Image (tube, grey):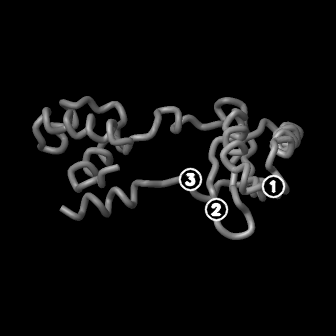
Amino acid sequence: MNQIDALDARILLALDDDPELTILGLSRALGVARNTVHARLRKLGRNGVLGDFSRRVDPVALGYDLVAFVSMQISQTQQPATTTALRALPEVIEIHATSGDADLMVKVVARDTQDLHRITNAILDIDGVERTSTAVSLHEAMTTRMRALLEAAARNS
């Protein structure tokens, strides 16, 4: 993945402010040639800098009001198969390999606590899972944010 330069950051910040901006609108707002904006957006998409559009969807809109984090200890020899099995559960929305006491940290969404119980039992049934510990999110104090990092990158021109 290539690094984002100051112009890329300015383009992304403008889109953050107004996601419906066209390439021509971005060009005018930033004082940059339309072809330059178009080429930059294509490069950002091709290089994997821009995530899937579905990442912007709030799980609450799909009926998943509860967020939980499941720390997992797994059999190291079965890690690839365990991760594959976790990916098969639609309620698993993030998986992170971690250091420390847990091997994996899994972010899940559920409709309610009964649904969370079903999901954690499904996780426990996966081959290679040795132990789990679940922490329910009571309140999202801050969403994932990238704007502050983009602003810093935009200043580095």
Q: Is residue 89 visible?
A: yes
Q: Do the numbered discs 3 and 1 sit on residues whose CB atoms are within 8 Å?
A: no
Select label 3 or label 1 by which is in front: 1
The residue singled out by tag 1 in the image is: 134
Classify mark 1: helix, strand or loop: strand
Left or right? Give the position of 31 relative to 16: left
Amino acid on which disc 2 is placed = Thr
| Residue depicted at 81% across the width and 42% down the height | 126
The residue singled out by tag 3 in the image is: 143
Across and down, in percent, residue 67 comes to 72, 47
Classify mark 3: helix, strand or loop: loop
Q: Do the numbered discs 2 and 1 sit on residues whose CB atoms are within 8 Å?
A: no
Q: Name the quarter where the C terminus is drawn.
A: bottom left
Left or right? Give the position of 61 relative to 30: right
Q: Is residue 113 visible?
A: no
| Residue depicted at 70% across the width and 42% down the height | 81
Q: Crowdedness of circle 3 by 10 Å Cα count: few (<14), some, many (20+)?
A: few
